[in-house]
Amino acid sequence: TPEVGIEVLAPVAVPHPTRLPSSEGATMGSLASGFIRWLQEGLASRAIECNGANAFVHTVPEGLGLVSPRTFQVFAASLSGEIQPGNRLPKELSPTVVATVSKLQSELKKAKLVQKNDQKANTDYFHAYLSTASNKRINMMLLQEPARFFSSLPTPNRALERAPVQTLEVK
């Protein structure tokens, strides 16, 4: 029985590599494709928590928020067999996991699957949110147009709000 307010996700097939309809002809690499499939299966089976206090995936009005670097580290560690029960990371990440995280984020950017943050002076792909419960700042990459990959998602997490853009004062 699904929890109240949590919609069960129907996985969508993601062949490798695939042409993305709204990404200006960008091709998704096999690592990015595997990551999307992992998200689909993990969210559908609830092996990956969404919108919870300890979740590394959150729905926000702008898209699907992927807490960085944790989401990518958990995926990479699951590929190498280093993940602990409950999606816990080992105390020290192997060079393989670190390299996989870097390659995965690069593939996601190249395929235009994640949104740039144009609010910053130096544009990058990281978006800051604040937890209204803990006042903790959370950095996320935003998966654009999640409806391409998920038939349904929970409503946006009301405990998260966009953090104000931090600017450096020049004295």
Image (tube, rainbow, N blue to C red):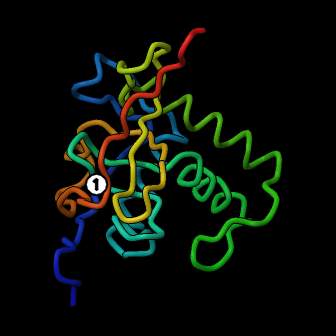
Indicate the position of residue 146 as horizontal and vertical percent values: 25, 45
Placement of 20 over or under 100, stated as above or below: above
To which residue does mark 1 refer? 59
Q: Residue furthest top?
A: 171
Question: What element does badge 1 sit on?
Answer: strand
Residue at 63% across, 79% down: 85
Residue visible at 76% across and 66% down in the picture: 90
* Residue in view at x 29 percent, y 48 percent: 161
Residue 132, above or below 142: below
Q: Residue furthest front?
A: 171
Question: Which corner quadrant of the image does residue 9 belong to?
Answer: bottom left
Q: Is residue 167 left or right of residue 40?
A: right
Residue in the foreground of this view, choosing between 157 and 167: 167
Name which quarter of the figure residue 158 lies in: bottom left
Residue 164 lies, with reference to residue 139, above or below; the image says: above
What residue is drawn where x is 36% and y is 59%? 40
Position in image of residue 143 (x %, y %) = 35, 40
Total labels drawn: 1
Who is closer to the viewer here, 113 or 166? 166
Decide if residue 9 is on the left or right side of residue 163. left
Q: Please provide percent x and percent y for residue 7.
A: 19, 71
**In the foreground, 45 or 6:** 6
- The amino acid pointed to by label 1 is Thr
Q: Quadrant of the C terminus?
A: top right
Q: On the picture, is 118 further left or further right than 126? A: left
Give x and y (percent) for residue 87: 58, 71
Quadrant (top left, top right, bottom left, bottom right) of the N terminus? bottom left
For the view shown, which residue lies furthest in the bottom direction? 1
Binning the other alpha carbons within 10 Å of mark 1 as few (below 14), some (14 to 19) or many (20 upward) gives: many
